[in-house]
Structures are given as structure tokens and as C-alpha cells.
């Protein structure tokens, strides 16, 4: 049998660190380049392949397709067909995939100081600031949807208790926001790494709060 045919018949072995260690097992599933950034995108809810590709500048179509297949095999994501009139396929996280949210939040907090200067080659999307900002909103006594307005665009986050399985943030304006806040990326990053509290930012006029209701009142310090 030709060598090429022998190679084709050989089963593909999944890459593994082959270590009986929880960290190694976790990295077996999410340690490949781009996987955690795909999780970041899917934390906003179901996304089409084309939307994922648009919001992951730099990833090739082959690599994105490969990572999504791996995530399905590892039980992190599923692909499903939307009912009419949508009739499109979307990817969404499983419960196990959503369990990576604290991991992404911790990485965002750890990496925030590295964003002191934006490089000329850096791409940016407004919703990439969602996970860092969630840290500043943690601990609010009132729950609700917060629409965030940056120069880079808009996104929305869910403050307070989030129903199990619900997205913790979303791209674009909220369908129905309980409060809107306007700030710039610099303030958002200061909030992310703890150099500034939300109360200090609002009190100093660096965050503008608009809206009525208990959540808006709390954010204003009332």
C-alpha cells in the first residue's frame, strides 16, 4: 500500500498534554489559539459564522471552522438552525462553555494594564470592553440592563443577577435598557483594573448616567 494511503487511513489523534492535571485537561480543551476569544464572542449569545469571523479580525476561515468543530467535540458549543424567517445556522455556548465566563473575566482583569497604549495595528470592537466593565458593575444591589455608549460603538451588559443560560452582554444597543451610561475607553479601562471606582467616575463627571428607575438612581449615587 502506498505510504500516502497508509497515512490517510491512520486515525487522527486529538492533541493532549497527557497529564492527569485539571489545568492540563482544561488547556486540552481551550488552550489553542483563538478558542477563548471565540468563547468571548459567544458569551454575547448565539452568533452566525460570518458574524464570528467579522468580530475576530486576523483569524482565517479554516482556523475558525477548525476551532468551532473542536469546541463542539469538547462540549463547549453547539450549532443549531434558527427557525424561519431566520433560517440561518448559529453557534452558541453550552452550559460548560458558559462556565468559562469567570475565566475570561479574570484574564480581562489581569490583562487590562497591558492596554495602557493602543497600538496602530490594534483592531477594536466596542463589546470587547464588556467583560472588563462587568467587574465595575459587580456588587450593585439592583439588577437590570445597562446600555454602554463608547466612541467605538454601543453594547449592553446585564448587571446584578443573570438568569442561568442568558447572555451576560450583547453587541449593539439594548432592546430595552434600564439605564444608559456614556464614557470613553480610557475610563472603561481604569474601571477594569481597579484604578477608578464607578462611584468616583460618576461623581467626577467621567461617566454620564441617563435613565430613571432604581438602577439609574443607584449608579448616580442616590
Image (tube, helix red, strand yellow):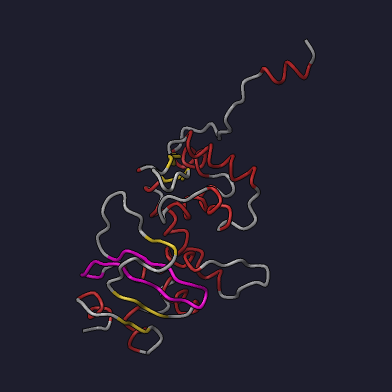
- Could you tell me residue 84's position as x and y percent? 40, 44
Check the picture and name the quadrant holding the C terminus.
Answer: bottom left
Nearest to the observer: residue 210 or residue 63:
210
Picture coordinates of residue 94 (x, y %)?
38, 42
Q: Quadrant of residue 64?
A: top right
State the image coordinates of residue 202 (x, y, percent, origin top left). 34, 84
Q: In the figure, 81 relative to 138: above or below?
A: above
Span highlighted in magenta in the image: 140-159
Q: Give the residue drawn at x 56%, y 51%.
A: 50
Vertical placement of 169 versus 150: above or below?
above
Q: Is residue 203 magenta?
A: no
Q: Name the outermost residue toward the right.
A: 2
* Total tally of numbered discs in the picture: 0
Magenta segment main secondary structure: strand
Viewed as shown, does residue 140 lie left or right of 7?
A: left
Q: Residue at x 51, y 33 (%)?
A: 19
In the current view of this chain or complex, which residue is farthest to the bottom?
204
* Looking at the image, residue 61 lies above or below residue 117: above
The residue lying at 44 percent from left, 66 percent from top is 172
Name which residue lies at 72% across and 20% down: 7
Left or right: residue 119 compared with residue 153: right
Instruction: Pick out the residue farthest to the top.
Output: 1
- Choose between 36 and 193: the one closer to the eye: 36
Residue 152 in the image: above or below residue 10: below
Quadrant containing the N terminus in the rendered view: top right
**Residue 55: percent from left, percent from top:** 55, 58
Q: Is residue 150 inside the magenta stretch?
A: yes
Amino acid at each position: 500500500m502506498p505510504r500516502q494511503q497508509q497515512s490517510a487511513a491512520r486515525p487522527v489523534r486529538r492533541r493532549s498534554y497527557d497529564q492527569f492535571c485539571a489545568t492540563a485537561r482544561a488547556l486540552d480543551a481551550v488552550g489553542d489559539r483563538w478558542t477563548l476569544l471565540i468563547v468571548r464572542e459567544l458569551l454575547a449569545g448565539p452568533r452566525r459564522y460570518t458574524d464570528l469571523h467579522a468580530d475576530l479580525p486576523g483569524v482565517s476561515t479554516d482556523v475558525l471552522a477548525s476551532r468551532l468543530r473542536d469546541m463542539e467535540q469538547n462540549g463547549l458549543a453547539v450549532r443549531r438552525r434558527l427557525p424561519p424567517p431566520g433560517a440561518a445556522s448559529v453557534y452558541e455556548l453550552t452550559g460548560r462553555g458558559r462556565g468559562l465566563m469567570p475565566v475570561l473575566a479574570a484574564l480581562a482583569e489581569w490583562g487590562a494594564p497591558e492596554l495602557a497604549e493602543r497600538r496602530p495595528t490594534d483592531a477594536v470592537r466596542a463589546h470587547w470592553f464588556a467583560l472588563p466593565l462587568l467587574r465595575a458593575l459587580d456588587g450593585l444591589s439592583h439588577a437590570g440592563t445597562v446600555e454602554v455608549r463608547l466612541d467605538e460603538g454601543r453594547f449592553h451588559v446585564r448587571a446584578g443577577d443573570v438568569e442561568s443560560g442568558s447572555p451576560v452582554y450583547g453587541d449593539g444597543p439594548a432592546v430595552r435598557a434600564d439605564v444608559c451610561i456614556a464614557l470613553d475607553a480610557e475610563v472603561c479601562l481604569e474601571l477594569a483594573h481597579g484604578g477608578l471606582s464607578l462611584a468616583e467616575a460618576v461623581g467626577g463627571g467621567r461617566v454620564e448616567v441617563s435613565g430613571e428607575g432604581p438602577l439609574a438612581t443607584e449608579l448616580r449615587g442616590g
